[in-house]
Image (cartoon, grey):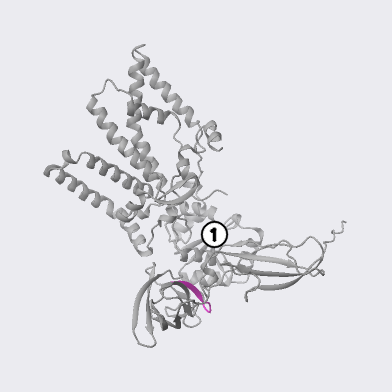
Amino acid sequence: MLASFYLGMMLTLALALYAGWHARALVGRAMLARAAAFAAASVVVLLPLHAGYLEVQRAWQASWTPGAMAGYSADVQSYRSAPPLMNDVYVSRSAR
Amino acid sequence: MTPAGAHERLLFPGLILPALVLLGCFAPVRGIPAADVRRARRLFGLILIVALVLSLGPYLIVWGVNTRMPMPYLGLYYLIPGWSAMRVPARFAFLALLAAVPLSALGVQVLAERAAKWWRWAPLGVTLALVALFLVELGGKPLPMQTVPVGRDVPEVYRWLARERPGPIVEVPLTPEAEGEYLYLSTVHWLPLVNGRTSFAPSSHDEAKRVLAELPGSRGREYASALGLRAIVVHGERLSREERLRWALAEEAGHVRRLAGFGTDAVYAVPPLATTASLTARIAGSDTLAPGQDARLGLLLAGAGAAPWAHGSPHGVARAEVLWTETATGRVTRATVPLTLPLVIVGGERAAVPLRLTAPAAPGRYALRVRLRGATAERAIEVREAPALASSVDAPDRLAARYLVEDGSGPRTLAAGDAVHYDVPPGGRYEFDVWPAPPVDAGRYVLEAGLVSGGAGPFSREDGVRLEVEVAPLRAAARP
């Protein structure tokens, strides 16, 4: 569920960028109808799966503050820090 | 120690991928219609850049320092519903990698069509060489895997739970390293389970685990009963010798009744217990607040009578009604504040819950009334400029300790104490274990200890402690 939520948010963003990029080509009655059908079908499929999580989120007001998220954000330096599963040359060099 | 989330910030993608992306973005590509190349570059380039920027999170962090400079992620946090549920902005690097794939494919095309001029099989060779380079970059290290029991290897106790279904359970010991296994094995029986771990745990769950860790003590047993648990699963092989002995003695004394035993695993019954749903409440904290001050008081809750109080369903954040009545005018101001109530308050005990509220803007004398689940607490508060110092629990504290010795030259400090990290509302209680290293030299000392907060001196506070200590050299034990 967690991975699907992240994936859903990221792909929605990518799709939004795609739709924004091709706005002129996509804006049309036929495409809008298809997009609405897709959104409705998505809600029908996803809502039963997410309903329990939404209920817990609502009851406990579970959300992350921007300050807490900052601790889990990429640093400019992060893109030169190799994860331990990469080859040892990269790992040892990035650890410096 | 590794800071939380440190592994999420290891995002080096290797050298091959960025090189191919750069080639794909800027080198002339032949063999693909120019319009398609242009479209792919613009679209996936845009997604790549947006994802990279979003992975930087709500504030720009440079070399580990939060610059507090707002980033676009912060705007999306407030604009898009559900955005605040994502804890790790760095994971947007995955979207950046996804967008990098088609761009790197263009880069491969650039290399392949250049190589094709030399030899007809060269494109295949280039592709295979790139795959080999990618594998070298990856290092060929196996993913760390955890072996878990399946089928007949599942411990018998879990199959018994699935068969007998005693009701909600807790598994002991409640150690963080065991929680993952408990969660996995709960799929054998699917009984409600106290154990578990998540990145977002309510404070009431942490407290439940803390009290249940006292099992088989009487407080833990009462808490388990009031919580509605019906069985305790004890894994003897995970306990220390002393803990195993405690369980054995509790069983011998009849404090716990064994339902079943499987090797070192045992299941004990939790008898039901009458609880009360009535609360009594009292407000603790400063009597003086500044106008408009965001104050943190304590709401001391207890069950009515000797029975434990149990939080009924549904669980979640409760809301208390706060009324400020100005004594001179009778004018009433209302507000609602969220509270996380404990799941159980053991009989005869009080639970302190932080009560965050804003003092009225106008100075004067007020009656502060808090209503919660039928209980009402009242306290007279004076709102005026230059209030009394806020409670020390509002700031991170440090327990300072020193040994003093009288040697004719006046008192001198011989050792200092440790930082104490806690969050306790006024009226609350927190026990901590600090070991100020004793002086090396033998003699009689006075050990002073006190909390340091807000620049206040540690040894002038009323709640400091002063102990007389004798430091004597240890004699070596006589050898047989």
Q: Is residue B338 above or below residue A15?
A: below
The foreground one among B116 and B18 is B18
At numbered mark 1, what does the secondary structure look like: helix, strand or loop?
loop
| Kind of residue at disc 1 | Leu
Q: Position of residue B192 (x, y in %)?
A: 43, 61
Please provide the residue range marked out in magenta.
Answer: B347-355
Provide the chain ID for the residue under circle 1. B
Q: Position of residue B399 (x, y in %)?
A: 62, 65
User: Which residue, given by chain and number where applicable, does mark 1 sit on?
Assistant: B174
Q: Is residue B260 above or below residue B225?
A: above
In the orientation shown, which residue stands out farthest toward the left?
Answer: A29
Q: How many marks?
A: 1
In the orientation shown, which residue stands out farthest toward the front?
Answer: B385
User: Badge 1: how crowded within 10 Å, few (<14), some, or many (20+)?
Assistant: many
- Residue B63 lies left or right of residue B253; in this view the side is left
Task: Check the picture and name the quadrant holding the C terminus of chain B.
Answer: bottom right
Residue B353 lies in the magenta-colored region: yes
The foreground one among B346 and B191 is B346
- Residue B159 lies left or right of residue B110; in this view the side is right
Residue at image point 52% right, 38% down: A84
Q: Quadrant of residue B56?
A: top left
Q: Is residue B292 above or below residue B213?
A: below
Q: Position of residue B31 (x, y in %)?
A: 27, 20
- Residue B173 lies left or right of residue B25; in this view the side is right
The foreground one among B193 and B199 is B199
Q: Position of residue B410 (x, y in %)?
A: 77, 69
Residue at image point 35% right, 75% down: B335
Residue B325 lies in the magenta-colored region: no
